[in-house]
Amino acid sequence: MTDSLSRLVDELARTAPGLRIETGAGGTGAYAYDASNYRVPPQAVAFPRGADDVVAVLRACHGADVPLTARGGGTSMAGNAVGPGVVLDFSRYMNRILDIDPQARTARVEAGVVLDALQSATSRHGLAFGPDPSSHSRCTLGGMIGNDACGNRSVRHGRTSGHIEDLEIVTADGVRAVADRTGLRAADPDDTDAVRRVARLEADLRHLIEGNLAPIRTELGRVPRQVSGYQLHHLLPEHGFDMARALVGTEGSCAVVTAATVRLVATAQASTLLTLGYDDVVDAAEDVPEILRRHPTAVEGMDEAIVATMRARRGPDSVTGLPEGRAWLYVELDGDDQAVVDTRAAELLDVLKARGRLTGGRVVHSPAERRSLWRVREDGAGLAARLVDGGESWPGWEDAAVAPENLAAYLRGFRKLLTAHGLTGVLYGHFGAGCVHVRIDFDLATDTGRAATRRFLSEAAALVVEHGGSLSGEHGDGRARGELLEVMYSHRMIRTFAAFKEIFDPEGLLNPGIIVAPARLDADLALHTPSEVLPVDTLFSFPHDEDGFAGAVRRCVGVGRCRSDTGGVMCPSYRATGEENDSTRGRARLLQEMVRGGTVQDGWRSTEVRDALDLCLSCKACSSDCPVGVDMATYKAEFLHQHYKGRVRPRSHYSLGWLPLTSALAGFAARPVNALLRGPVGRLLARLGGVTTKRRIPAFASRRSLRQVLRASKPEEPANALLFVDSFTRAFRPHVAGAASRVLADAGICSTAEDGLCCGLTWVSTGQLSVARRIMTRTVARLDNGDDRPIVVAEPSCAAALKRDVPELLGTDAARRVADRVHTFAGALTDLAEPGWTPPPLPENVVLQTHCHEYATFKGRHPRDLLGRLGVRKVDEAEGCCGLAGNFGFEEQHYDTSMAVADLALKPRLDGIYAIDGATPTVVVADGFSCATQIDHLAGDRGVRAVHLAELLDPAADRPDQPGETS
């Protein structure tokens, strides 16, 4: 710790004793990055709980001459949210909605409020905050104010600056003030010193504006998306010296925003979506001016690479509703009457067809289909980062904007520029506002590539200025474009920007290197890796990443979808704790630091990385939900293997990691073993094994019960499938194997049982990869014997292990052949059942807990869809992890987190199924043994038991009860 940082920490301990501040590698490493190309490790990260904490930090930084960077969701793509001194994370605690006034249509919020949280709260009043960036599920209002963010519906609602009533700020020297539509005032009118200092600050600003009226009037505010530089035109006399709007878009370089009063808009009663197909994005851009004449709310564009990547990552059915084409526009129209809106959409489609550029078009009526289509567009930044062919692309010129009528001409010139430099760009963005996002396959890892990138960016800046545009249309200048502002503005305007910042921040401590006195755009690049990096020789093959483990963890580019509280399944631990290090992104960033030998310097032995991975439930949801396909469960398994190589492991790695072996032994004496485990000896053994005593250990089934089940379900006809009897089914619920066999036969899938094999899952999840490989090798040898019949696995986690972990850990053709044959039970009934198969009568309503591994690995083959097709009227799915997650929820130190995760989705569903009069609850379906065990634990004595899908569909009249020693 440097002397200045030590003084700062000591000062804060005195002035803000409740302030949490992190200075170690484990607490700061993840904050070296945002969603940009840059890496700037901070000295400390502070987590303020209120404005007083912010004042204390700024005064301490001012006194110790330490720079400070304000940070919201950390999703900035231009390097706006990384800095070398103290980073203030507003998202952790300062995330309260302070007031909503439906009559005035305003809301007062703290800087760390996530946009979706505000939208959820205001929707109850029929109101919303107009700007809606694609990162709405994790971006904060403070970050949106910093960048002057816009969003998909900016055609209607414009930029954040147009929706700000006032800002509560703290100046660089620690004075609280309020910037409103008429100027600047001290927050506390009784604080005479603050009143004097703020008055002097405003006087200096007025003097600056009066001396530069001509360049401000001629150079600023020329196009709707002109975000680059400072928005000083809001301070012109004709605009009433609107200090609030002038500070929007300053990227935290002039003052720190702690709270804001924002204006709200009424939500439309009706809307519809029109999808339009084109041969390329230039054709799409040509139609934009005509579309804008119809007053749409959104006109969004994207090219074919994004759609192809989404389909590859989440399955071919993940994108439906798009017409033929290689580029598309989404056009949203709204109004008060649905029929009128639909008619407007149909008329617009006819007009565009007559123009002759369309390859197809359709009005999308289904709300579910609309949500799916918007998901593709909103994930554009991540999808474009790692494409189907494995290629990587990067931001840096992802934010230019021109007037919409100039968009087609700009795109023609831009594509020629890409070709001239031998680069490829993936295009998407807000075509209706003339703002184009593009990720480009820059080579940022070599000196030659960085020099070529500089040349390209300089020429791109000249091109956009030639077309009357702006370097930034919503992401801000940050570190990516600050150096290029001289291409866009006169020297006098650049000096005016510098004078504006100096009035607010004379020492230059607030977000240094941004906009004024900018850092070189190729400085501090994350891919500028030092020559000495961690040797990476791994057991997992990471076949989809050119650089193996290093390339795999580099998949994380910081878009932060894992920090969302809603939608999808990832990241359950982040949703439970709210900590950056418990997010997929935070863990990936620390792994990147470990690989490069940065803030984490002890490689595989790192305790910081171990601690960050500790609460990862290995749910694998990130491998599906993350737009770039980060697979933290696999990274964790590899890390644990390397970390504990040749060392004593945690006790639970032995007690739970070796469960398939110990459960097989227990099956020979199930009755006495179960009796022993239910008493004091069982509690002692649990404590010795690192297992929580707050859960009942599931009862082991006897080997005899399994033999009886398999004998009874032996097929009379030649089998056309294998039923893989996994370790969990064999040890705890053999009746599921019997039910599965009967259902498969009823559906025309005659199966033989394959018993005595193991997928190796428990050894993988505890990082015992050498053992896992031996287990898997034996299993593959048995299954890859010339037999090409489908392999049906009743336990979703085991099916996922055979499908993904086995080929990626063994890396053999035999393993891949076996993986290609694997089906979950729901997948087998979806793909292999005879046409016209009808199951026994099913309940109208079902509560469903889908296993995370099934959700992530078997795309488009989920029980929810199957149940719907089979006639269940309502499937109430607990979207999210159950919290048990195999060994995780049984480990003593993880019990509380396990239950917190269950509280997010599963427990509310269970609480909602009890009738007021105590009637029989809705059927609960959970194919995963972990999920069923968690449901049993949550239900207690309330009589709820989760059934496997096979039990629900079993044609037999006498369906077995839960397994036990007497079965």
Image (spheres, rainbow, N blue to C red):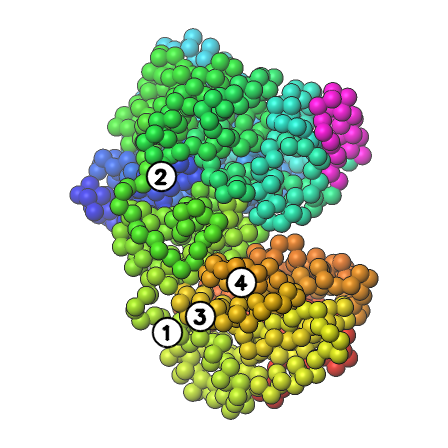
Dot 2: within a 10 Å radius of its alpha carbon, few (fewer than 14), some, or many (20 or more) residues?
Answer: many
Q: Nearer the viewer, residue 265 or 154?
A: 154
Closer to the camera: disc 4 or disc 3?
4
Give the x, y percent position of residue 751: 69, 72
For numbered disc 3, what is the local secondary structure? helix
Q: Which mark is residue 441?
A: none
For numbered disc 2, what is the local secondary structure? loop
Label 3, label 2: how far apart the Cα atoms are: 38 Å
Residue at position x 51%, y 81% from top? 664
* Residue 472 in view of the camera: no
Dot 1: within a 10 Å radius of its alpha carbon, few (fewer than 14), some, or many (20 or more) residues?
Answer: some
Label 3, label 1: how far apart the Cα atoms are: 22 Å
Give the x, y percent position of residue 798: 55, 67
Give the x, y percent position of residue 874: 73, 59
Viewport quadrant of the C terminus: bottom right
Residue at position x 38%, y 26% from top? 452
Residue where numbered disc 3 is placed: 774
For numbered disc 1, what is the local secondary structure? helix
Residue where numbered disc 4 is placed: 814
Dot 3: within a 10 Å radius of its alpha carbon, few (fewer than 14), some, or many (20 or more) residues?
Answer: few
Tag 4 near tag 3, CB within 8 Å? no
Closer to the camera: disc 3 or disc 2?
3
Q: Amino acid at mark 4?
A: Ala
Q: Residue 307 colored magenta?
A: no
Q: Amino acid at mark 1?
A: Arg
Of the image marks 4 and 3, the number of the one nearer the N terminus? 3
The part of the chain drawn in magenta is 339-365
Of the image marks 2 and 4, the number of the one nearer the N terminus? 2
Q: Which mark is residue 526?
A: 2
Label 1, label 2: how far apart the Cα atoms are: 38 Å
